Each structure stands twice: as C-alpha cells, then as structure tokens.
C-alpha cells in the first residue's frame, strides 16, 4: 500500500500523541483509533496503516525474552530485569523461558537485538571459525 507523506506525518503524530513518558499508553491508542474511525478523515486508512506499523514496531522493541537452560533463581531474574531496564528504558515486557538447547548461559532477545551468551552459541561460533 502506497502511503503519502501526509498520511505518514499524521500517523506519526497520532503515535506520538499516544506516548506517555516515552512509553506507549494502550488506553490512548484505543481512544485514538476510535476517534479516527468515527471521524473518517481524508486518507484515514493509510494513516491508520502507518500508525499500526509504528505501534507494532514499538511493541516489538519493548518486548524481551530471556532464555536459559534451567529455571533462573528469582535474584538472578531481578538482576537481569534491572540491567535490561537500565539499558532499554522503562516499560519493558520481560519474559523468562527455559530452553534446554541453550546448554548454559543466557540468550536475551529485545526486539530485533539478540545477545547470545550461551554455550551453544559459542560452540556454533567456534565451529564456523574452524
């Protein structure tokens, strides 16, 4: 779908209006969507398409998955949570998963960034270098 410059500007303005202290507010997103769909301004479909893209990218950037070989102790979970919050900001949705294929260490995925400190990752890197 071809999106005009004006629709991009409008979508970004709607997106910025939904942010509170740098974090996307779900209630405001719903209000904005309801208001735009009710009014149906010119080019609203393209504007909503761009707005949806920006919301989706922001949600992906604010989602973190931490994989480990075994269940982490609550103290370590809290340490990882505080370090990730310090690095990526408040409003991070963090989940911990157990993946036996990791063998040891941690693999952290925040949006499109991957921090691989696992034994399996190091073995794969060693294998590719030989």
Image (tube, rainbow, N blue to C red):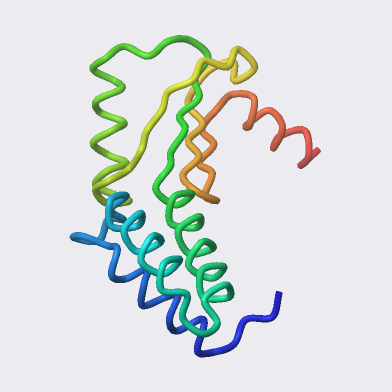
Residue drawn at 51 percent across, 15 percent down? 98
Which part of the image, by quadrant, shows the C terminus? top right
User: What is the quadrant of residue 95 in the picture?
Assistant: top left
> Looking at this rendering, what residue extends furthest in the left direction?
21
The quadrant the N terminus occupies is bottom right
Q: Give residue 100's quadrant in the image.
A: top right
- Quadrant housing residue 77: top left
Which residue is pictured at 45% across the width and 58% down the height? Answer: 55
The answer to whether 18 is drawn above or below residue 107 in the figure is below
Q: Is residue 80 above or below residue 87?
A: above
Closer-to-camera residue (4/95): 4
Question: As drawn, is 54 to the left or to the right of 89?
Answer: right
- Outermost front residue: 38
**In this view of the protein, which residue sits in the foreground, 113 or 55?**
55
Please state which of residues 95 and 125 is positioned toward the viewer in this rendering: 95
* Residue 24 pos. (x, y %): 31, 56
State the image coordinates of residue 29 (x, y, percent, origin top left). Answer: 35, 57
Q: Is residue 59 above or below residue 1?
A: above
Query: How many circles with numbers are drawn on the protein?
Result: 0
Give residue 112's position: percent from left, percent from top: 55, 51
Residue 119 located left or right of residue 36: right
- Residue at 53% x, 14% y is 69
Residue 61 locus on image (x, y percent): 44, 52
Q: Is residue 35 above or below residue 25?
A: below
């Amino acid at each position: 779908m071809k999106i005009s410059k004006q629709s991009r500007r409008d979508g970004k303005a709607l997106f910025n209006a939904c942010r509170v202290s740098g974090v996307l507010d779900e209630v405001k997103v719903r209000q904005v969507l309801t208001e735009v769909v009710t009014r149906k301004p010119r080019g609203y479909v393209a504007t909503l398409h761009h707005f949806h893209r920006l919301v989706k990218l922001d949600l992906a950037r604010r989602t973190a998955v931490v994989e480990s070989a075994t269940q982490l102790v609550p103290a370590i979970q809290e340490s990882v949570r505080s370090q990730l919050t310090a690095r990526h900001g408040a409003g991070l949705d963090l989940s911990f998963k157990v993946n036996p294929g990791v063998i040891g260490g941690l693999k952290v995925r925040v949006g499109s960034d991957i921090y691989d400190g696992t034994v399996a990752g190091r073995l794969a890197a060693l294998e590719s270098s030989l």
